[in-house]
Image (cartoon, rainbow, N blue to C red):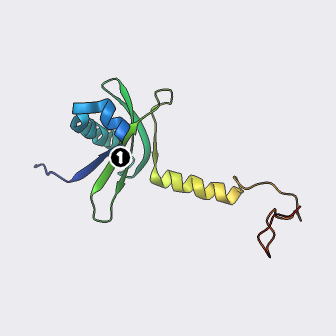
Amino acid sequence: MFQIQAPILIVPTADAKLAVGVHLHAAGLAAYREIALAAKGLEIAHLQFVFRGLTLAVCSRVRRDGIVEIEIGLGDPRLPKSAFTAAQMRQAETASRRSGAGRPNRPAGARSLISQDNGSRSM
């Protein structure tokens, strides 16, 4: 058995840099460990965990060049510890589009507020 060192890019937000301070390298390692323990793959849309009393939120992706990139920001301690993969977010967006969620409910035949011909507002 042997170990390898793979490049992982850690991108902290300004708030995370300020809050974590000199422990930023350790926070990056902790973020990678939490992503691995979530066992949902390397593309995580949102994952929160506690590091040295701070709630951190991370997202990760695999870049085109194969390097894993992990963004670290401050999380919300009021939210439960959970992880959403990028694939789950795409599935939710697709389902939302199919159900028509987010579209304004206009009665059939309702006119647009913007006139098609000259861009002026109709009354």
As helix, strand or loop, the secondary structure at mark 1 comes to strand
Q: Look at 22% across and 38% down and name the residue there.
A: 25
Image coords of residue 48 (percent x, y): 41, 35
Image coords of residue 99 (percent x, y): 70, 56
Q: How many numbered circles are shown? A: 1
State the residue in front, 108 or 30.
Answer: 108
- In this view, which residue lies farthest toward the bottom? 117
Q: Look at 63% across and 56% down and name the residue there.
A: 95
Q: Look at 32% across and 65% down and name the residue there.
A: 64
Amino acid type of the residue that numbered disc 1 sits on in the rendered structure: Glu
Residue 52 placement: quadrant: top left
Relative height, residue 3 to residue 19 (above, below): below
Q: Look at 29% across and 43% down and name the residue there.
A: 32
Relative height, residue 122 to residue 10 (above, below): below
Tell me: 34 left or right of 97: left
Image coords of residue 63 (percent x, y): 33, 61
Image coords of residue 2 (percent x, y): 10, 49
Relative height, residue 52 to residue 41 (above, below): above
Residue 54 placement: quadrant: top left
